[in-house]
Image: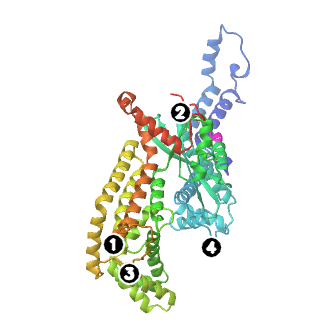
């Protein structure tokens, strides 16, 4: 079928040239001497040409040639039906292939599987690809006719097999990989890697390249997703080898890397055997930059695991969601009591997303407590009834838990805002440094005045739902004084509010400040590197001190690498 798909213009030129040669120079009944015999009499050649032009055979052939040209223009030749058939067949296959490519693009963009258990059009449990093809055939006459020919076994090549799908995907990937030419033209680039398991429990590593697009009039920084890399071993050496093999297959020089960005996992950022260390051993100019959003995520993770009360707080939030999501009956009870926000499950990887769960509980404490009591009375599950009643009478009836809701909402709201800004495509390094400094300033100010403002907000919530505004008192333990101890030297006992502020609030805020100052150091170093030296000579001692601290933290010493100015 592919051999028949020829262009009409080429066929017409071939027929025209053949007929012209036959009619003019190979006429069987020609009586012209010039047409039959060769002539070497160049002196009288003009006379022979004039004689030939007036001959009956020449005029007849000329008339036939003109008539053929007219018939070709009007498409009235003997090959007219063949031309129409080829033209219609070409248009039909172009329409079929256009729709097949559209289906492939749709599935690829939405990250949907192509194939299922079988590839039979007449089977009801067909895969996504054939299902979309059949759906298009219900409304599109071209695809409807194509499916009719397939089911009637009138054609053998239908272009719906898995081999054609893979071929189209490969050709599309080659088209996408044309950005490699832009990267080669820019010469210098940065690499971004991240690993995650897919649905088939196979580890895949995404390869993203970032460069300056100099092919446009307006120079712009672009970021391109290249491909997924199948990874069997997630060690630093294995990931580094996969990166080198991928760059070599793309024809990119590893010495042209000027930046590398990964998450904060030990196999990526490890200062001895991580990917960034192995790349720096080969290319000292490949400056390592940890992911800013992942760093903030680790800050929240450290804060949430700093003491037992914080772990119990998020455990209670997750337990509330678990109670209501246990059955459709429990969830309907929750929906009947709530007006706006529903409970959200806590994400185990994105800690800043916990704000959605905390916000839903804090804004509807009374209604959630009412729903928990209804579940405890109506459910037949003894364990579920016990959990619901304990949450309603213990956590949601405790002023200490309400205060924790307010504190964590204030913290998560500010961190989540900065985290989303850092993930913006238009984010600049100076803006990122400014936002991190503002976040540190927020925690410094929140350490001084945040506890008092949080208590006021918690008191307002507690008064609306009828919760006592008191902290649970602990029994004061007494210790026997030894004979050599001086009287009246024991520490003055703290109140319940002071203990909560000292062992809960200050612990959370101080860990946040420590982690932000440590993890945000990298952005400050890069910001100082981008300053003009004639504007930053006075900051040179500070810059060297910060740079030395960063190199010490990441295990990079001046003896290991020779950095050029």
Residue 75 got which mark?
A: none
In this rendering, which labeled residue sits more in front, label 3 or label 1? 1
Point out the frontmost of discs 2 and 3.
Answer: 3
Which is nearer the N-term, disc 4 or disc 1?
4
Mark 4–mark 1 distance (CA, rounded to whole Å): 68 Å
x and y percentages locating residue 436 in the rendered image: 38, 49
Magenta includes 248?
A: yes
Q: Which of the two residues, 18 or 210, is positioned nearer the viewer here?
A: 210
Which of marks 3 and 2 precedes in the sequence? 2
Can residue 74 be seen at all in this image of the molecule?
no
| Label 1 element class | loop
Which numbered disc covers residue 185?
2
Q: Which residues are magenta?
A: 247-252
Mark 4 — residue? 125
Sooner in the amino-acid sequence: mark 4 or mark 3: 4
Determine the secondary structure under disc 2. Answer: helix
Mark 3 vs 1: CB contact within 8 A: no
- Say whether residue 128 is magenta: no
> Who is closer to the viewer here, 246 or 371?
371
Distance, label 4 to label 3, CA atoms, is 36 Å
Q: CA distance from mark 4 to mark 2?
A: 48 Å
Q: Which residue is mark 3?
A: 335
Q: Residues within 10 Å of mark 3 (few under 14, many from 20)?
A: some
Packing grade of label 2 (10 A; few <14, some 14-19, many >=20) is some
- Compare marks 3 and 1 and give the one earlier in the sequence: 3
Q: Looking at the image, is 439 positioned above or below residue 74?
A: below
User: Could you say whether the residue bearing mark 4 is in a helix, strand or loop?
Assistant: loop
Q: Quadrant of residue 407?
A: bottom left
The Cα atoms of the two marked residues, 3 and 1, are separated by 40 Å
Which residue is labeled 1 in the image?
495
Kindly indicate whether the residue at mark 2 contacts the one at mark 4 (C-beta within 8 angstroms): no
């Amino acid at each position: 079928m592919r051999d028949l798909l020829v262009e009409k213009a080429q066929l017409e030129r071939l027929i025209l040239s053949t007929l012209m040669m036959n009619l003019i120079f190979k006429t069987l009944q020609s009586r012209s001497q010039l047409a039959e015999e060769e002539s070497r009499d160049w002196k009288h050649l003009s006379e022979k040409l004039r004689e030939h032009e007036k001959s009956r055979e020449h005029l007849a052939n000329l008339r036939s040639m003109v008539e053929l040209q007219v018939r070709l223009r009007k498409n009235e030749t003997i090959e007219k039906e063949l031309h129409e058939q080829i033209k219609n067949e070409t248009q039909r296959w172009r329409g079929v292939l256009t729709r097949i490519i559209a289906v492939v693009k749709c599935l690829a963009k939405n990250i949907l599987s192509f194939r299922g258990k079988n590839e039979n059009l007449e089977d009801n449990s067909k895969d996504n690809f054939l299902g979309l093809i059949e759906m298009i055939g219900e409304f599109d006459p071209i695809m409807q006719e194509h499916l009719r020919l397939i089911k009637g076994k009138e054609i053998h090549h239908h272009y719906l097999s898995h081999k054609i799908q893979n071929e189209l995907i490969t050709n599309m990937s080659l088209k996408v990989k044309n950005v490699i030419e832009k990267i080669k033209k820019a010469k210098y680039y940065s690499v971004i890697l991240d690993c995650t398991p897919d649905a088939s429990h196979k580890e895949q590593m995404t390869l993203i390249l970032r460069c300056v697009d100099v092919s446009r009039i307006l120079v712009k920084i672009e970021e391109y997703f290249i491909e997924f890399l199948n990874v069997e071993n997630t060690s630093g050496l294995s990931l580094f080898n996969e990166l080198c093999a991928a760059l070599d297959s793309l024809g990119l020089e590893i010495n042209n890397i000027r930046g590398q960005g990964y998450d904060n996992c030990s196999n990526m950022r490890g200062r001895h055997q991580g990917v960034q260390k192995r790349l720096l051993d080969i290319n000292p100019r490949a400056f390592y930059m940890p992911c800013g959003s992942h760093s903030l995520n680790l800050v929240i993770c450290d804060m949430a695991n700093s003491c037992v009360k914080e772990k119990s707080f998020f455990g209670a939030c997750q337990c509330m969601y678990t109670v209501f999501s246990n059955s459709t009956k429990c969830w309907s009870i929750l929906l009947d009591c709530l007006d706006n926000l529903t409970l959200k499950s806590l994400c185990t990887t994105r800690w800043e997303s916990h704000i959605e769960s905390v916000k839903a509980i804090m804004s509807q404490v009374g209604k959630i407590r009412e729903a928990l009591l209804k579940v405890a009375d109506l459910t037949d599950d003894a364990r579920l009834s016990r959990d619901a009643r304990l949450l309603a009478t213990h956590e949601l009836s405790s002023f200490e838990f309400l205060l924790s809701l307010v504190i964590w909402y204030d913290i998560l709201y500010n961190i989540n805002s900065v985290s989303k800004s850092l993930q913006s495509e238009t984010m600049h390094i100076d803006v990122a440094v400014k936002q991190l400094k503002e976040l540190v300033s927020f925690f410094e100010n929140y350490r001084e005045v945040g506890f008092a403002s949080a208590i006021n907000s918690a008191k307002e919530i507690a008064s609306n739902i009828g919760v006592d505004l008191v902290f649970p008192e602990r029994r004061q333990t007494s210790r026997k004084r030894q004979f050599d101890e001086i009287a009246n030297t024991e520490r003055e006992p703290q109140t319940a509010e002071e203990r909560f502020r000292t062992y809960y609030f200050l612990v959370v805020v101080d860990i946040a400040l420590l982690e932000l100052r440590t993890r945000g150091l990298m952005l400050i170093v890069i910001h100082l590197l981008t300053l003009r030296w004639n504007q930053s000579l006075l900051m040179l001692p500070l810059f060297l001190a910060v740079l030395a601290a960063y190199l010490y933290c990441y295990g990079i010493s001046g003896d290991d690498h020779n950095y050029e100015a």
